Amino acid sequence: GLFGVPELSCPEGFREAQDKALQESEQLVQKACSTPPGPETVMIFDQLSDALCRVADLADFVKIAHPDFAFREAAEEACRNIGTMVEKLNTDVELCQSLRRLLSDEVVMSSLDPETRRVAELFMFDFEISGIHLDEEKRTKAVNLNVRILDLCNEFLSGTHLPNKIDKHVLPEHIRYNFTAEGNYLQVAGLHADCQDDLVREAAYKIFLYPNAEQLSRLEELLASRNSLAQLVGYDTFAHRALQGTMAKNPETVTQFLEKLSDQLSKRTQKDFEMMTKMKMKVNPQNSKLMPWDHPYYSGVLRAERYNIDPGLYCPFFSLGACMEGLNSLFSQLLGISLYAEQTQRGEVWSEDVRKLAVVHETEGLLGYIYCDFFQRPDKPHQDCHFTVRGGRLRENGEYQLPVVVLMLSLPHSTRGAPTLLSPGMMENLFHEMGHAMHSMLGRTRYQHVTGTRCPTDFAEVPSILMEYFANDYRVVNQFARHYKTGQPLPKNMVSRLCESKKVCAAADMQLQVFYAALDQIYHGKHPLKKSTTEILKETQEKVYGLPYVPNTAWQLRFSHLVGYGAKYYSYLMSRAVASMVWKQCFAQDPFNRAMGERYRREMLAHGGGKEPILMVQGMLQKSPSVEDFVDALVSDLDQDFESFIMDS
């Protein structure tokens, strides 16, 4: 069966696994309600969470990645049914009372260890989000809002990808071939950001981002419903609710962080825009005003012109085998961990090219499993991601339930003459996703509810972004990058060129991220919104980003991150700031320092989400970073490295 779960040898097995989980959860609910308040209460809640997550997490992955439609459909159904059960439990007054009895018993609470206390509080937080503390009428309202929000999220998400159609005669004949024809119409399904022709990019931008009335009303209703729910359960705004327990803690801190970062970036961003404008003038002297559709294209042109970083020059040095060897060697030196390929049983994997790795510590033994679903196949989503399939936890019998994760990438297959070769970007992504996997393997918490990457969003990306710093360090790359034919190592100046090329227009790229994060905060801030979502977009774009808003466009209707990262889009920037500080302070001098690797494991990875994120950062950096420290870390990463500047010259 899939992942070694015997029931899942056929799609129908999902029903069986789901029914078993629902049955088990009903018994656990009864047990929780009849147990006197104490550490056992938290144990039972965690078993309950585990019983449901073991099916839901696995199904979450299968429904998007399995090549067989019947499996995908069965998994989708299981997700829905478990989701319904979770909603029901979150509004079960008697179940909540058993937890409240524990939380209000000061004597028992003071005897619990910090992790158990935190997990109890997190479970309570889940109840309160569902309005459990309200009277019955308001509670029903909260449940209905939750259901409506879920539906709106799914509808909005689908709408972000839908192509727009236009009468083909509207477009000049010589650019029509760039778009898919459908009778008299052309379909525009994206921004064509890499196209050399300015006119194609302009047309794609104006057509793809043309406002769709249904999508607009979905977004407005989603933002209003999120706000109503947050206020109903006692928060000022949805952002206040979403940021509880995060590193930032509240929207005021996020706004301060974004404003200070924007101030620090503004001069550099202006310089970047001036360079791009000059570049555009060369190509298109009649129309050299820099527009939003020019930024991604001209920053790429500048990068390529200034540093010859054609991926074709690098790929031969980054065979998949060499990259995996590099990761294995790095983890072994830093953490005493090795990756071993394991044979899979029949029916355990969903595609024959999936590989299973056992993660083994030199003294502690087996830590968990990583399934590597690395290659392209038809119908497979084109996203690189990490899925938790089973969380780690201490079982009742004293054994540890080993974590199981999947890493999904979209790498090309090997050919007869060459192994799978990765571009520098793919290599960096592999390291990034492996950072998540190591967090899952080493976040060995007692409770599954806070295992591995089950931690606040603005902390979750720290381990993965930190791995990008290793992937861009010559000392690390030099250990594994070898030409697959000649065995020759990758020359040092090629690595320096690659690293420096990433700094070209990096301020403008970061400014764009600040704009997206600021927009997300305003949308999830005080309601009713002062203006329409499009007017807010126009105002924020001109104030924070600096390139003009284009009339009759509504980029926010394509902003799919509003669904999964509502009020938390800033997380990526804040995680990068922390990763940068950890790199500079702990690993930049020696990326293989075992003592630092052990400190990193002990202070940052080991707790999963079982400790407040800012305390983990303090433990690692041995000081409490301020908003200014975060900003300085991000801005100092933009400066050219003097040594490679000299080498290039």
Image (cartoon, rainbow, N blue to C red):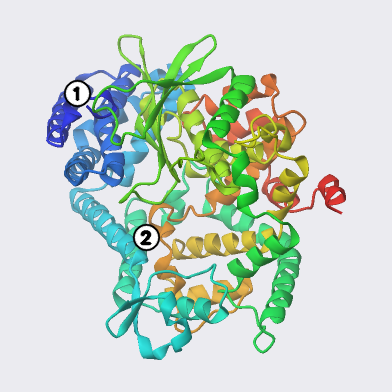
Q: Position of residue 78 (x, y in %)?
A: 18, 40
Q: Are marks 1 and 2 in contact (CB under 8 Å)?
A: no
* Residue 368 at x, y percent in the picture: 42, 21
Q: Is residue 172 something one can see in this rendering?
A: yes
Q: Quick one: SS at disc 1?
A: helix
Disc 1 versus disc 2: distance between alpha carbons? 43 Å
Please tell me how crowded label 1 is: few (under 14), some (14-19), or many (20+) other residues with Cα within 10 Å. few
- Amino acid carrying label 2: it is Asn
55 shown above or below 597: below
Q: Is residue 137 above or below residue 105?
A: below
The circle on residue 227 is 2
User: Residue 526 appears at what percent x and percent y?
Assistant: 45, 64
**Figure quadrant of the N terminus:** top left
> Which one is in front, 160 or 633?
160
| Left or right: 621 in relation to 156 | right
* Image spot of residue 26 (x, y percent): 15, 28
Q: Give the number of the disc on residue 6.
A: 1
Residue, x 23% and y 39% (percent of image)? Answer: 86
